[in-house]
Structure formats: C-alpha cells, structure tokens
Image (tube, grey):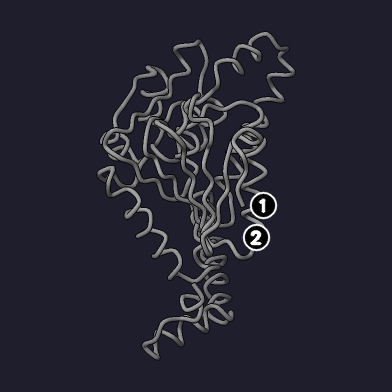
C-alpha cells in the first residue's frame, strides 16, 4: 500500500510481515502538523491491528528523520485559544502513546536529524538505530516552551538526570551522545544502516510473534509495579500461560527437536 505524498504526508509499504512507514514531507524535514499527526496515528493503529504485520519500521524521507513541529503549524497554534492548543496537544499525545504501546515491535531508522517531536518518535520505538551524522535536540525551551507531551517517553529512554539537562538547555547533541544516554541502541555507518535494520528485523521474525509483541507489555508492567508479591504472581501466571500456549509449545518442541519453529518457516 502506498499513498501519494501530495495526498498524504506519509507512505506505507509492506514487505512480507514488515510494515514500513515513511514520513513524506522532505521539503519540510518531515515536520509535524495536524495532518501528519492524524495520518501517522491512523496508520499505526491499522498496522497494530493487522495480524499479518509482525514488525514496523518508522523512517523519514529526505535529509531528516523529523524536525519536530512545522513552523506554519506552530504559528497557527500560537494564535489559537488555550482550549484549541490543548486539543492539539492531546492529538500529539495520542500519537506518541499509540506508537509506544503498539502491539508490534517497532524500529526507528534514524538516518538524519531528529528534533522535538522527532525525538519523541525515536524514544517511543522499541529499537532505535541511527547514523553518526544524525543530530538530536529537545529545542522547545528556546521558544519558551517545554517538550511536555513527549516527556514521558523521552524520560523513560534517557532517564531523569539527562532529561533535566537537555530539556532546559535545548542543546543539540550528536549520535554518540544519543547512544550514550540511551536514546539510540546502536550507531552504524550510513551505508550500513539498512543492513543493521534488516538484522534486527530478522531477529524479531525468528522470535515467537506473541512473545515479541508482548515483550514491551512485560517491561512496562514490571517497571510500573511496586508490589513484589503481585509481580511474582503475575509473572508466574504469564510464563505458565506461555508454556502451554500453541506458540510456546511449538517453540519448545522446535528447540528440543533442533529445528526452526513454524513461524520462521512462514516468512
């Protein structure tokens, strides 16, 4: 499936079990406006609900991954009421939460700059791989603003102490720093980026589909739980259910039989 960039600000393509979503506003460095936010949210919802999709790659067209907010859009929102700005922010919040909670593994292919909301997209993805030339910035404070909507996801990725620095200073940082603070999982040469993405996809497609999709739910539940007894019980219930499930039985049988599980044969 592909959409004309004149009609929609993104392009969705499918290759087997992988859905690729490409932000398609290269002249504006894939900056956000209301149309892009709505289109990306809808496309992610559809990919998440599609049983044939097992992984999602998010990428950008042109020189940048995403430069954050579109200046014309920001100009319009600056002239709008507080209520209109609240609704606009809630739409962005829905996008970020949809990506963060998508019931499929997600990979950010960061080939260029990511600023503001673009950093939010990177932080929401399960795996983020960038190139040395990529630049990053949470630049809202330069405008007297803060990255409020994306803050839960960025803080989860880089931690509170790092967030306090970058939120306050609006300083631009490089890919090496993004790797060090946890925003990126890996940095590879530009000509090796696609191969690195494919390696991650191959690993995801070898994993059990339900297991790979459920990994983020497990991490979120464990991270948010302070009741250790409840956590032990919930995790015991989880692994017991997985062991007797069709996927768990196939995975264990394949391992013992020294063969590939059925789901890898279908790729």
Say few, some or many: other residues with alpha carbon within 10 Å of mark 1 (under 14 / 14 to 19 / 20 or more).
few
Q: Position of residue 221 (x, y in %)?
A: 54, 54
The residue lying at 49 percent from left, 34 percent from top is 120
**What is the residue that sits farthest to the top in this orientation?**
79
Say few, some or many: other residues with alpha carbon within 10 Å of mark 2 (under 14 / 14 to 19 / 20 or more).
some
Q: Quadrant of residue 213?
A: bottom right
The residue lying at 58 percent from left, 39 percent from top is 10
> What residue is pinned by disc 2?
50
The answer to whether marks 2 and 1 mark residues whose Cβ atoms lie closer than 8 Å is: yes
The residue lying at 44 percent from left, 27 percent from top is 115
Q: Nearer the viewer, residue 97 or 22?
A: 22
Judge left or right: residue 1 versus residue 192: right
SS for tag 2?
loop
Q: Position of residue 241 (x, y in %)?
A: 58, 76
> What residue is pinned by disc 1?
46
Q: Nearer the viewer, residue 20 or 262?
A: 20
User: How far apart in space, not on screen, are marks 2 and 1 (Cα)?
Assistant: 6 Å
Residue 137 appearing in the image: yes
């Amino acid at each position: 499936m592909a959409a004309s960039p004149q009609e929609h600000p993104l392009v969705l393509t499918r290759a087997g079990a992988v859905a690729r979503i490409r932000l398609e506003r290269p002249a504006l460095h894939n900056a956000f406006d209301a149309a892009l936010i709505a289109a990306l949210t809808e496309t992610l919802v559809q990919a998440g609900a599609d049983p044939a999709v097992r992984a999602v790659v998010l990428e950008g067209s042109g020189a940048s991954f995403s430069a954050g907010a579109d200046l014309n859009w920001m100009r319009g929102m600056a002239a709008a009421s507080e209520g209109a700005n609240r609704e606009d922010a809630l739409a962005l919040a829905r996008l970020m939460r949809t990506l963060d909670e998508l019931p499929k593994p997600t990979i950010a292919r960061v080939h260029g700059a990511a600023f503001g909301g673009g950093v939010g997209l990177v932080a929401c993805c399960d795996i983020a791989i960038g190139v040395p030339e990529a630049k990053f910035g949470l630049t809202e404070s330069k405008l007297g603003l803060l990255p409020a909507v994306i803050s839960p996801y960025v803080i989860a990725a880089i931690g509170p102490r790092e967030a306090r620095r970058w939120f306050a200073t609006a300083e631009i940082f490089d890919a090496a720093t993004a790797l060090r603070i946890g925003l990126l999982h890996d940095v590879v040469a530009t000509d090796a980026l696609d191969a690195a993405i494919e390696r991650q996809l191959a690993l995801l497609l070898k994993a059990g589909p339900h297991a790979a999709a459920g990994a983020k739910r497990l991490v979120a539940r464990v991270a948010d739980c302070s009741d250790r007894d409840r956590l032990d019980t919930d995790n015991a219930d989880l692994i017991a259910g997985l062991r007797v499930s069709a996927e768990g039985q196939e995975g264990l049988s394949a391992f013992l039989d020294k063969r590939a599980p059925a789901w890898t044969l279908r790729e």
